[in-house]
Image (cartoon, rainbow, N blue to C red):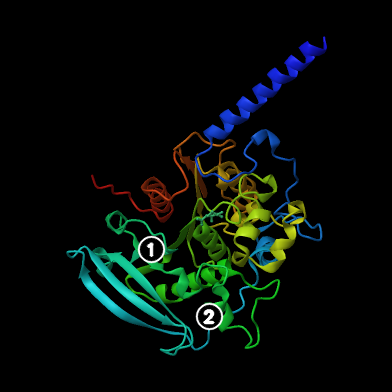
Amino acid sequence: MKLSFLIKIAVYSLLVLSCNFAFAASLPPGTPPGLYDEGNVPKFTLPDPLVMLNGDKVNDIDTWKQKRRPEILKLFETNVYGRTMIGRPAGMTWKVTAENRSDMNGLAITKTVTIYFTGKDDGPKMDVNIVLPASAAKKPVPLIAIVEWAPQRQWLLDRGYGLATFDAAQIEPDSKDGYSKSIRKFFAKPDQNQPGPDEWGAIGAWAWGLSRAMDYIVTDKDIDANKVCVAGFSRFGKVAMWAGAQDERFAIIFSGESGCGGAVIVRRGFGETVKIINIKFPYWFCGNFKDYGDRVNDLPVDWHMLVALMAPRPVYIATAEQDLWGDPRGSFLSAKYAEPVYQLFGKKGLGVEDMPPLETPVGITIGYHIRKGTHNLTDYDWQQFLNFADRHFGIKTIIKE
Ligand code: GTR
């Protein structure tokens, strides 16, 4: 009797072990340890984007715009990304420091615009590299602004879009000791050596850089100022989301596998968690965010509310099947739970109930797909972004063979 019980335990343990092993084997190599079993995702209650902190219900667009939207923005500032400490500096200037109106064998206009944040040549500055299809000379073109990790220029141009990009390090080096060389430090009080707990992190600083690039972009006659999108992949996908939330001049927001702190419901604790990201990348966020590592349910926001801040503008969220660390389902749910705010504007939002099959883009004003493969921003992702943008800008898609 005793022996058969032991045998049962042994068989059961073996079964459990082999199941775990089989599951672990299905995770892509290099995936850090974490919660990857949907069955173990805890139950949670999300804050309602349409209920004010004081309990008042938001029933109309005006109340959303005047009260709830600013309230949510402030909650993200105070608890997650930190306050953006400056706007456009009063003395800021720019100069087109290089221009070729017949680049790439006549296919492109390229230019470098140097933005002098204090108006001084020897002060902090940033080079924005712009490439536009040659057609921009006749008719202003739509454009995608992105921090690093930009797509291939050629086919972006073939589809009639321009690109503006800059290196993050010009605003702040992407490292734990980057603060001393950052714009955050430059504009801080002289004796300040670290940001206050609710002051901007590096994500906030890079997003600020996107807005300063935008200050120039809207003045460029070759670019259609009403069709400027912001995009980003991974950490810069988080930046694109935060830039899009704060700066409503961006017409469409594209987030590529932005994961925790970008587009996922963090209460799920799936893959990368608030606790882990704050340990690995403490400088990305504000000090206050660190308090939520062990009590994520106390956060007054979750990321469906960041998606909702884009409303009524279109937003597209791309994920990948094997990027479990970035929780593709968590992004889908953010898109889904942002829908009520889009509906307030008479928009459908996502328009589907369930996660779509692989490589089947869905969504109307909120777009979403999950593609095959790992953490990356691929041509497939870009094609979907541009299809989505074409649809919203009323552009007929021309795909060259
Ligand atoms: C991961 C990180 C993510 C994501 C990504 C990246 O390791 O945990 O939050 O931002 O890197 O930017 O490459």
Q: Is residue 349 visible?
A: no
Looking at numbered disc 1 in the image, what kind of residue is underneath it? Leu
Residue 12, image quadrant: top right
For the point 54% across and 44% down, which residue is it?
A: 31
Q: Earlier in the sequence, mark 2 or mark 1?
A: 2
Name the residue tied to disc 1.
143
40 or 344, nearer to the observer: 40
Image-based side of 194 in relation to 216, left or right: right
Query: Dot 2, crowdedness within 10 Å: few (<14), some or many (≥20)?
Result: few
Q: Position of residue 314 (x, y in %)?
A: 51, 54
In which quadrant will I find the N terminus? top right
Q: Position of residue 169 (x, y in %)?
A: 46, 72
Q: Is residue 366 visible?
A: yes
Q: Position of residue 22 (x, y in %)?
A: 57, 28
Looking at numbered disc 2 in the image, what kind of residue is underneath it? Arg
Q: Residue 113, relative to residue 14: is it above or below?
A: below
For the point 53% across and 37% down, which residue is it?
A: 27
Mark carried by residue 56: none
Q: Residue 13, relative to residue 281: is it above or below?
A: above
Mark carried by residue 88: 2
88 or 252, nearer to the observer: 88
